[in-house]
Image (cartoon, rainbow, N blue to C red):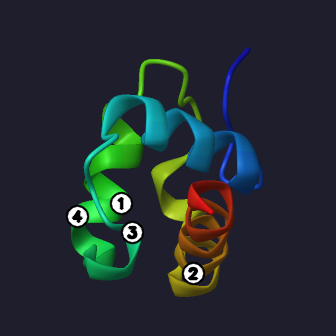
Amino acid sequence: MALKWIDSREIAIALIEKYPDINPLKVRFTDLYEWILLLDEFNDDLQHCNERILEAIQACWIEEMD
């Protein structure tokens, strides 16, 4: 399954699996962006990302960690 920018929860889950020891509250958006691009499942236009999307992914990551 290819992940798109709109797949916030699925991206967050993939990040948890890849970076289990990372606290999402301490991740800079520049790092978050790069880490998403490194996910094997990610396949979307790089230009479609913005701060709002990264905030949504980070919020899902925080929720999933609880």
Residue occupying the point 60% across, 65% down: 57
| Along the line of sight, the residue nearer the viewer: 31 or 62 | 62
The answer to which of 46 and 53 lies nearer the viewer is 53
Residue 55, label in figure: 2
Q: Label 1 vs label 4: CA separation?
A: 5 Å
Type of amino acid under label 2 = Glu
* Kind of residue sitting beneath label 4: Asp
Amino acid type for the residue under numbered disc 1: Tyr
Above or below residue 12? Residue 24 is: below
Q: Which residue is mark 3?
A: 24
User: Which quadrant would residue 60 be assigned to in this image?
Assistant: bottom right
Three-letter amino acid code at the position of disc 3: Pro
Label 2 vs 3, first from the N-terminus = 3
Residue 31: assigned label: 4
Pick whichever of labels 4 and 3 is earlier in the sequence.
3
Residue 51 percent across, percent down from the top left: 51, 85
Q: Is residue 1 left or right of residue 17?
A: right
On residue 33, the disc is 1
Q: Quadrant of residue 59?
A: bottom right
How far apart are the two marked residues, 1 and 3, measured between alpha carbons? 13 Å
The residues tagged by marks 2 and 4 sit, at their Cα atoms, a distance apart of 13 Å
Relative to 39, is 21 above or below? below
Spatial CA distance of label 2 from label 3 is 11 Å
Q: Are the residues flagged by discs 1 and 4 in contact, CB closer than 8 Å?
A: yes
Q: Earlier in the sequence, mark 1 or mark 3?
A: 3
Q: Position of residue 30 (x, y in %)?
A: 24, 72
